[in-house]
Image (spheres, helix red, strand yellow):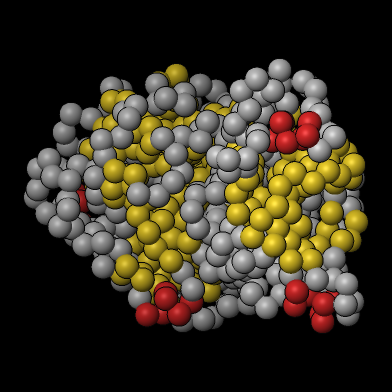
Amino acid sequence: MISSPSLATRASSLGLVLLGLVGTSGPGLAQLTLTTDGISRGFQITTFASGFSFNTGQIGPLGIAYRTDGKVLVTDFDSFNAGSTIYVLPSHAGGQTSPFPGAVHYTYGDASGLAQIQVGSTWKYFLGQQVAGKIVEIDSDGNYLADVVTGMNAPTGMAPYPPSAAVGPLTGHMFVTDGLNNIWNVDPFGIPGGTPGTNVTAFKLAAGVGADGLSFSPDGSIVYVAFVVDNVVRAYDTSTSNLLWTSPFIGGGPDGTAIGLGTLTGYIYVNCNNGEVWELGVPGGPHAGAAPLKIAHNGSRGDFIAVDPNIWSGGAFPSLLLTQTDRIMRMDPPGGGWFGPPTSSPDPVLCLTCFPRLCEPGSGGVIGCPCSNPPGGPARGCNNHGTETGGATLDGSGTPSLTTDNVTLNARDENASALTVFWTGNNLIAPPGVLHGAGVRCVSGLHRLYSGSASSGAITRPRITDPSVSARSAAVGAPISAGETRYYFTIYRDPQAATPCANTASTINMSNAVSAMWTP
């Protein structure tokens, strides 16, 4: 987002190409594409949502937040016209096009950045208003609830403090940049309507020119801040506010930022106003000192970055959502890589109809994989041999109700055409789990539900011709009673696992597990 005192001056000083079009959905606007380097690195780019209209002075979609029903909030920033809009997109799936159902016109002024913080089992949503100089709390529909901060000059980037850091004085806080190039530490649960000095304290004043999008290292020790006008990213120690690092010069206005994880550890990703996306090596990691690499270009205008949560959305995940002038693009990571931290949740499965994921080898106290084949990311089983997909993921969705059972089990990233068996179990083997073939199993009291061959590594059961999960469970001698929790996972052929496992019997692998509590 732009960040100098006057909105009109900001747009001019950053050389923004607003095209002078009014009420245009922008079908002719340039579309973000991968560079040769981005392709060789294994990234993929698709369209998440398109058809956002824009006027002169309207930057386009900016803030993105996630609801527990699987819907997605998106702000459409318009500083010079009648106000901004908060759209409620129906899902995390790609290819969504305006008009979006459930649009809310935000009547309290302008709507720019969004941040969300988990409080118990619920989420609190916060909206930056650049023109009004406020941060306000909103509900999950975009309705105003209360002022959190007033009198701030154009709050711009907002990032919740990550949960993987130990509980301490920053837990539940947000860091916010403003139009005077300051970085603030905001306690959104402090004094309502506070001004700097109450629930807002200075983290770094006059940090540079064009302070904008922020992101934290996973452990919370470092905050990375993009500076649009200075054309750099700077890293600060969150405990001392000391400057730790300044990136090489990146022309084009670096704006949104996100951290790489897994095989992308040691990189930070930057969305730029000139329609480019860069990969930068950060200090202390395996790619420190690496030259900046342009991985995407030809975009219309890059702004904030949002990390899509750990929800199946058609590609690898968590993926990046990159805002542009009239659309939002999705960048999927290469195998074994992902991005974060996406929200203030350590396991951001934000869908009430999604089943909790369990038995992730090497995580949460579960034992590691037996054959030097750790999973390539979250929510996976042990990596496959030969195909190296990163490990299989099982997701469950639908309503686990005995009267309205529409539960679906979806496995992906198995071997291409692997023979697959879906299993259910009555009991969860507490961590650490047990070794099983080339994988780890955490479920016992087993019954076989469905089988079939995967296609391109994916298989879904039940099909339209199959009995429902509850009916099939009864048929195999495992009837479900209301109030019971059942566990599900897949076992599939992984024939090349025998050699690295040094065991000729180790020709199978398995996904993670999911659970469902059944209602009447």
Residue at 58% x, 27% y is: 189
Q: Where residue 267 appears, x then y in whole percent?
A: 54, 69
So how many labels did they put on this image? Answer: 0
Residue at 83% x, 43% y is: 447
Asked if 148 appears above or below 494 in the picture, the reply is: above
Residue 325 in view here: yes
Residue at 81% x, 38% y is: 476
Asked if 410 appears above or below 388 in the picture, the reply is: above
Asked if 15 appears above or below 466 in the picture, the reply is: below
Which quadrant: the C terminus? top right
- Residue 155 or residue 63, whichever sits in front: 63
The answer to whether residue 155 is left or right of residue 417 is: left
- The answer to which quarter of the image holds residue 256 is bottom left
The answer to whether residue 233 is left or right of residue 105 is: right
Residue 117 in view here: no
Q: Where residue 159 appears, x then y in whole percent?
A: 51, 45
Q: Where residue 228 appears, x then y in whole percent?
A: 33, 59
- The answer to which quarter of the image holds residue 369 is bottom right
Residue at 23% x, 30% y is: 83
The answer to whether residue 256 is left or right of residue 203 is: left
The answer to whether residue 250 is left or right of residue 450 is: left
- Residue 262 or residue 370, whichever sits in front: 370
- Residue 396 or residue 474, whichever sits in front: 474
- Residue 153 or residue 175, whichever sits in front: 175
